[in-house]
Image (tube, helix red, strand yellow):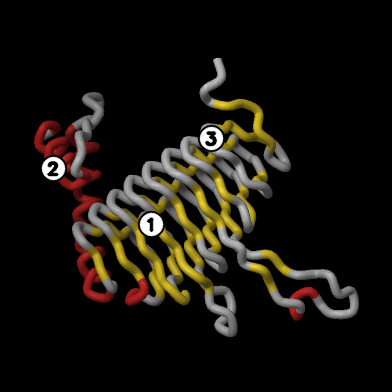
Amino acid sequence: MLKIVTWVISKIKKREYKVDENISSIDLLVILWDRTWMMLRGLLHKILLKESLGLLFVGKSVKIRSHKRIRFGSGVTIEDGCYINALSRVGVKIGNNFTLGRNGVIECTGVIRDLGESLEIGNNVGISANAFISVRGEVKIGNNTIFGPGVSLFSENHKFDDLQTPIYLQGVTKVGIEIGEDCWIGANSIILDGVKIGDRCIIAAGSVVNKSIPSNSIAAGVPAKIVKNRFDK
């Protein structure tokens, strides 16, 4: 059974995948049972989506709004309790082998007087549980990038220069967020509007990134600062 499951998953992901040999047959059957139900829920959502190129796995208590603004690749998994609001000017485009962990939130629009811009996510991107991605400005995430639990992205800032006017009436700026390929964004990190993170970067857990980070950097702290280049010995 282990070999069969390994073969099936490799076909879905379109790359070599090996299931841990220590997993028991009973545990494997439970996982397969859950995934079968996720696939059936996915079939219902696929009918509503603008585009979905392959298998879609959807967990329990998942809410998706504005299906017709979403394009999914193949092998997408939306785990239990997630919420996706795709109402935005351009929409949401997500590549192959994407995972949104449990209770993750993708929220493109907060108030309907000012729609969010767009979200584009590449292939083989994994976002762990309890992530919050605000897509008020344009958000781009490159291929092969992974997020630890509790990561937050905020692609909007409030204006606050006028002391005589409530902040919520002063409008916002939306520069957007861009995260490159093959990055690792550590648990509970916060990435703020206007930040560009280059390819192959590592952001340490708990960091607050308020300035752009060049490629191949390791950054940490509040606010985040570059502590090392990955090519340094």
Specify the quadrant that holds the C terminus. top right
- What amino acid type is highlighted by mark number 3? Ile
Dot 1 and dot 2 residues touching (CB under 8 Å): no
CA separation in Å, label 1 and label 2 = 22 Å
Residue at 67%, 47% (x, y): give it. 211
Direction bottom: furthest residue: 113
Q: Is residue 209 left or right of residue 59?
A: right
Q: Which residue is mark 3?
A: 202
Mark drawn on residue 24: none
Image location of residue 213, percent across then percent down = 60, 41
Could you tell me which secondary element the residue under label 3 belongs to?
strand
Image location of residue 105, percent across then percent down = 49, 61
Foreground mark, 3 or 2? Answer: 3
Mark drawn on residue 8: 2
Mark 2, residues whose alpha carbon is within 10 Å: few (<14), some, or many (≥20)?
few
Image location of residue 99, percent across then percent down = 36, 50
Q: Which residue is mark 1?
A: 80
- What amino acid type is highlighted by mark number 2? Val
- What amino acid type is highlighted by mark number 1? Asp
Q: Is residue 135 left or right of residue 159?
A: left
Residue 175 versus residue 28 in the image, above or below: below
Residue at 20%, 63% (x, y): give it. 40
Mark 3, residues whose alpha carbon is within 10 Å: few (<14), some, or many (≥20)?
many
Residue 177 versus residue 202 in the image, above or below: below
Foreground mark, 1 or 3? Answer: 3
CA separation in Å, label 3 and label 2 = 32 Å
